[in-house]
Amino acid sequence: MTRKTPTEIGAEVTTRLTALVTGGAGFIGSHLVDRLLEAGYRVVCIDNFILGRKEHLQAAQENPDFTLEEFDLLDLARLHGLFSAEKIDIVFHLAANSDIREGTGSTDRDLRLTFMTTYNVLECMRRHGVKRILFTSTPAIFGEHDEALHENTPAHPESLYGASKLSAEAFIMAFSGLYGMQAWICRLSNIVGARSTHGIILDLLEKLKVNADELEVLGDGTQTKPYMYVHEIVEALLFIRANSDERLNVFNIGPRDTATVAEIAEMVLEMAGKGQRIAYTGGSRGWKGDVPFYSYQPSKLEALGWPRPMSSREAVRTAIARIIESR
Amino acid sequence: MTRKTPTEIGAEVTTRLTALVTGGAGFIGSHLVDRLLEAGYRVVCIDNFILGRKEHLQAAQENPDFTLEEFDLLDLARLHGLFSAEKIDIVFHLAANSDIREGTGSTDRDLRLTFMTTYNVLECMRRHGVKRILFTSTPAIFGEHDEALHENTPAHPESLYGASKLSAEAFIMAFSGLYGMQAWICRLSNIVGARSTHGIILDLLEKLKVNADELEVLGDGTQTKPYMYVHEIVEALLFIRANSDERLNVFNIGPRDTATVAEIAEMVLEMAGKGQRIAYTGGSRGWKGDVPFYSYQPSKLEALGWPRPMSSREAVRTAIARIIESR
């Protein structure tokens, strides 16, 4: 079986497919918008600009194939209007409350921004006959496990973010079965790169600016996760969409290796510090609901022919460099 | 390790625990209410009487330890009021849209009645410091599988009912982790018995009354599922609550064997028919979203010391007899 390479994925779009990207002004969303435009799609982007930023779409807005819709996916009537006005071929549904720590303050934030938004998208797809959805999910659905996560690891979420994403997956599966939709559910490892709106690298760079003596790091530095560079995740999403053609396509996406928080803090210090020393706040978790350790067993994605991404440390190092460059 | 028998479960309640039973006027709920009162609990029952029936609570209402609250769990303010007024020790959360077929008409029926009700219960528990919840879930969370279902079978729901129950499980797990709640998630096989408000036995008995020649049966008769008698499931719920003491306790509950729709139709004919012949509507599914075959591998429950329940055929036969008797 021959696999489509990322370059061929662009070449195949000859019929001017229209992609709806929700959360398209966000970190991953805006990189995806740029890549879809490059591949020849017409792109409609929805964002409520809670986390998304207009400047991420500067290049896209100069492209006549790009349309920006500024409203909230919770506004079901307006979303119906959009689905009536545009003939959408595929939805890339990325909109969510991606800031996990924020989710523990009020218990319905993730429920509304991550789960109900997904229900609204599915309901509009059903009513308007849109049959394809790619959804970005998360390893937070799994909770804590000793073993490397594979696609069928039992899901026991320990955060409202994880619970909301798992609920969204559940409804995508049911809508897919009941209404003949094809779905790609992609569970993204930690993603780093330019345009990120939160996360450890930004946190640490901010702290370096304000404290000349000390770099405060949440937890004890042992938290361990796989990291992927944002350009590579966007290629992976398009690769999976092009090469996996079941009704329901579920993939964990990330490198096999991991980086620790201590390693990341040291890289940040080395690349942007002024000799500060690292001060850990202690405890194995960065915050309540944090899963302090996970790793991925991405055999399914590898079997599909996807080349292994750069290592977690390489991804982090590349991201630090690009973020510093863009400031 | 010694296990508590169902009789001892009753004997242990010496401190007058208060149980809140949601959906307590329903089929399983009302049997649970009776059993909890017998075991010495104070019981507060909430029901909106969409599926529940007042006559199911006739015996309970003569008991001074029983309180009936008639309102909808979607009314969060009123639910908060109840949690303020009553010191609740444990919630048995059974309220749901249990009629799976009804769920496919509008896509937000299960979402509201099965999922949002669960979120409201969890949020009230969190705010009022209630730390224990037993939740009745379903094998519909799993979707179709060739193998017998165990607790860690991958969940791929194909109905909005299954998706809503899986979402409810996800939020229970997250609330349990974040706010220190203990949870028992019990995935009940098909349950039969007196007071059932829908399901195959009632359907067939109704049809027998109106057609003297023919008994119409949905599907081709090959649909195969495990069935459990309602009194046995209530004992199983109390047994699991008493004998499994992890933070998160997840169990599939049902017999290892199964009965087919054809077998059930033949039993109904034999016990209540007037020589009608069976006419199958054809197709492997009774309705859209139906999982035509599943079986259980209840090793975890057996390992806890629970005696095997009656067979699926015995459960169905007992239920038919009791339903005929009670009409």
Image (cartoon, coloured by chain):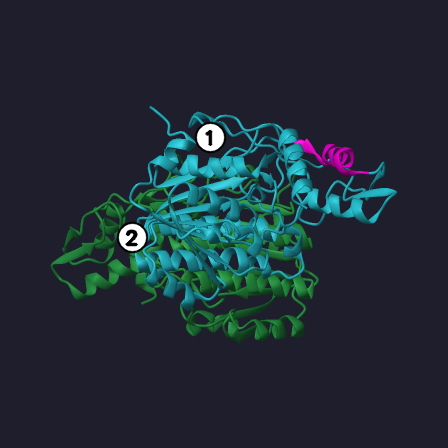
Chain colours: A cyan, B green
> In the image, what residue type sits under mark 1?
Leu
Mark 2, Cα crowd under 10 Å, few <14 / some 14-19 / many 20+, is some
Residue drawn where x is 58% and y is 35% of the image: A228
> In the image, what residue type sits under mark 2?
Lys
Chain part drawn in magenta = A258-273
Q: Is residue A266 magenta?
A: yes
Residue drawn where x is 65% and y is 34% of the image: A316
Q: Is residue B197 above or below residue A312?
A: below
Task: Return the chain for callout 1.
Answer: A
Image quadrant where one finds the N terminus of chain A: top left
Q: Quadrant of residue A45?
A: bottom left
Q: Is residue B162 left or right of residue A267?
A: left
Q: Is residue B48 above or below residue A79?
A: below
Q: Residue furthest right?
A: A213
Residue marked by disc 2:
B288
Q: Residue furthest top?
A: A1
Expressed as whole percent of the image width and height from the top left, the position of residue A318 reads 64, 33
Q: Is residue A9 magenta?
A: no
> Residue B1 or A196: which is nearer the viewer?
A196
Expressed as whole percent of the image width and height from the top left, the position of residue A172 reads 42, 50
Residue B311 disc label: none
